Image: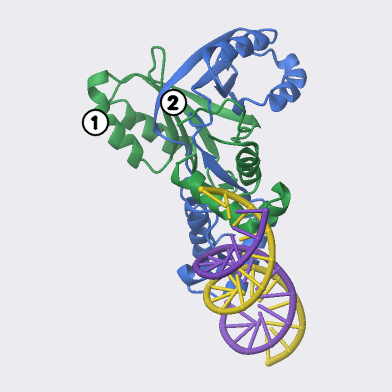
Chain colours: A blue, B green, C purple, D yellow
Amino acid sequence: MLDKIDRKLIELLQSNARISIKRLAQEVFLSAPAVSARLERLEKLKIITGYTASVDYVKLGYHIMAFINLEVAPSEKVVFYPFIQKCPNVIECNCITGNYSMLIKVAFPSTVELDTFVGQLQQFGHTQTQIVFSTPVPHRGIKPADYSEEQ
Amino acid sequence: MLDKIDRKLIELLQSNARISIKRLAQEVFLSAPAVSARLERLEKLKIITGYTASVDYVKLGYHIMAFINLEVAPSEKVVFYPFIQKCPNVIECNCITGNYSMLIKVAFPSTVELDTFVGQLQQFGHTQTQIVFSTPVPHRGIKPADYSEEQ
DNA sequence: GATGAAACAGCCGAGCT
DNA sequence: AGCTCGGCTGTTTCATC
């Protein structure tokens, strides 16, 4: 489904999403229209789901990053999912194995706002909060490998 | 340090990093050169740290995503940090409060490769792994707010 | 997938507020 | 000092092979 060139294009766009199509074309030894068509296909198939700017949240005033574990009863999920999607300070939310079934990554200006938010979450269940001290590996794209599935 | 226009530009680039400067200029009612200069400044100040393509890891063959808690002795961090940065399957690694001081997000083709990786991590300390079932809120940029710091 | 042409966007200067 | 305008260069896209 993905050939070597598609994987190379994805890799280049992961490291710089604003690279020009012409430059991409040079890197993979293809013409610009050919690359353009490949990108359209990758986007249409939702293999590439978007292009985003990465920002320094501390410099934007979000000094506190944290992971919140939240134990949500299965029956509450229909209420919880729309709620969590609308929270502006939620960077990511995953449903995971284990006692605390939701793992939520958030950013706040200070612990005051974090505390308020955790208070709101407690209507859904027990929480456990871990504050981020440092980030040895910032969120990054991982290389597309050979074992991509057919579809 | 950041005015309303800077915040709007960041927000637009977070939702689509490949938007043209001309289009950005129209959105904020400025000229293209003015927007270009603002972006250069935001990049130079490392407020915008990069532009990345988001991909569907399942479609790339990474069927298993997981969070691994790892208890690392402080003295081991000088060895652990370079190690974890070089691991190709690590999406993110944070140092956090609590017993398990590292929280590592990874993606693997199957539980077999995940198991092998967890085995490697155990030279650094005790681990606890939680596999992702679903992702109600995928990793996303949060809106730049008014309380951005001076610098 | 390549080529060439036309439309478009980005860049650098000059002049203005 | 920072913005806008104009012309030049580079980029994207479309039609054709």
Q: Position of residue B129 (x, y in %)?
A: 46, 23
Q: Nearer the viewer, mark 1 or mark 2?
A: 1
Judged left or right of residue A79, residue C13 is left
- Helix, strand or loop at label 2? It is strand
Q: Nearer the viewer, residue B55 or A89?
A: A89
Instruction: Give how far across and how far down residue B143 sits, in percent.
Output: 63, 33
What's the residue at 27%, 26% (across, down)? B77
Q: Which mark is residue A56?
A: none
Q: For the residue labelled by badge 1, is the local secondary structure a helix, a strand or a loop?
A: helix
Query: Which chain's residue wears label 1?
Result: B
**Is residue B21 shown above or below B99?**
below
Mark sitting on residue B79? 1
Q: Residue at x 75, y 25 (%)?
A: A82
Residue A75 image offset from top left, x and y in percent: 75, 15
Q: Residue at x 50, y 30 (%)?
A: B66
Q: Where on the picture, by quarter, is residue B46? A: top left
Position of residue B34 relative to residue A94, above or below, is below
Q: How many residues crowd mark 1 within 10 Å: few (<14), some (14–19), many (20+)? A: few
At label 1, the amino acid type is Val
Classify residue C14 by image quadrant.
Answer: bottom right
Identify residue type, mark 2: Ile
Nearer the N terminus, badge 1 or badge 2?
2
The reply to whether the C-beta atoms of the residues labelled 1 and 2 are less than 8 Å apart is no
Q: Is residue A45 visible?
A: no
Q: Which residue is mark 2?
A: B68
Q: Residues within 10 Å of mark 2 (few under 14, many from 20)?
A: many
